[in-house]
Image: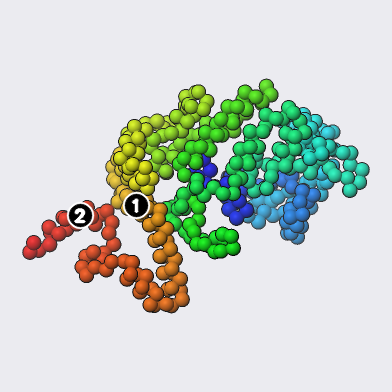
Amino acid sequence: MIGKGYPAPRGKFRWCTERLKINPSNRFIRDVIRTNGEAILILGTRKAESTKRAGRMKKWEAQRVRNRLSPNIHLPNSLVYSPIEDWRNDEVWLYLMQWENPWGYSNKDLFAMYRGASADNECPLVVDTSTPSCGSSRFGCWVCTLVNQDKSLTAMIQNDEEKEWLQPLLDFRVELDAEENRNRRDFRRRNGDVQLYERNLDGEMSVEPIPGPYLKEARSDWLRKLLTIQTQIRRTAPENMRDITLITTEELSEIRRIWLEERHEFDDSLPRIYKEVTGETFIDPRPGAGNSLLGSDEWAVLEEICDEDAMHLELMAKLLDTERQYRKMSRRVGIYDALAKCFETSSRSPDEAIKNAHLKRDLKAAASEGDVEKVKQLTLGDVAVSENDETDKPQNWANIKFKNRDSAQKPGE
């Protein structure tokens, strides 16, 4: 979110699970299979966790090769072993209270944490199937916006005064979950395209651009708030939690790289934000990260020249930084296409870009309906047609650069 500007995950755009959980795990399993030929994945999944999970596990049972051992449909040469699939919640806690875990932490502390995360602050003795278990509370990512409310963290803070230091985390998560944040997001997608969709506004359909990634100001604001919370918690948390890390140095380094290399924001604001919030100098582990021909001074000059025209500033920054990226290459293959892409995505004002997207949408609809008159009206009415065949050719940076040279070589001139 802070680096690339992705919006908070939603049910219809659940980008986090695949990118941050499934894909990294699958890469590791594939490496094990390549090394050893096969692998067995041991999972603690249980049918009692949810009705949906119980249904999925029932389907896997039909393909089993032996008891509790199922083929992994996504990864060939791997099997899934689920030893506690039929355990109830109370049976899990009964086991944990009787046996020590291999990593040396107290299971009683774990029990107390889950008890505090229950709304009634209780973990009753289970005497029959109607008695609720302590395991009804669930824990996942602390910033997860796929649920309506973080009930576990809310209950922990309400039930225990010693957990009040966690309140900034809950507040940050609520702010991430704000539904209306269009003013903080780009009107284009990450590839620069303007995509339209039909939106219901008070019973009336409105065709509007799909909100894209967070803008530079919003991403900087999220980073500043996250670092502020981390700094605050390290002062107010219990002694054994004051080394808590919400964002690592490696993550900060990658965010800085994305801002510089992909977003062309060569003002390099991350070290400055880090210094202002933490009072410490950011030490980037990436070699040569601070070496650049362009910096905050050049960015300030551009801002002054562009006079608050955000699209003009973006275009100039992209052109300058694209030239910088190709500067040290022995063969600058692709630079013309890269520069042309800058103009394609950043040369129009928001109003012009949205109007052009509507034109493309209407033209596509007319073509699919076979409305020839409508197609002519849209194309001939909005596009200037030249009688000169030369101008009908697609223009790119190579054509423009070598136009004069080609003209000079024509016979008779």
Circle 1 is placed at which residue position? 347
Residue 42: percent from the left, percent from the top?
Answer: 71, 45
Q: CA distance from mark 1 to mark 2?
A: 22 Å
Task: Using a 10 Å C-alpha cutoff, classify the residue at mark 2 as few (fewer than 14 neighbours), some (14 to 19) or many (20 or more).
Answer: few
For the point 28% across and 42% down, which residue is it?
330
Q: Quadrant of residue 329?
A: top left
What residue type is disc 1 on?
Answer: Ser
Q: Quadrant of residue 105?
A: top right
**Marker disc for residue 402:** 2
Residue 102: percent from the left, percent from the top?
Answer: 74, 32
Whether residue 321 sits left or right of residue 70 in the image: it is: left
**Residue projecting furthest to the top:** 239
Looking at the image, tell me whether mark 1 or mark 2 is earlier in sequence order: 1
- Quarter placement of the C terminus: bottom left
- Identify whether 380 is placed above or below 284: below
What residue type is disc 2 on?
Answer: Phe
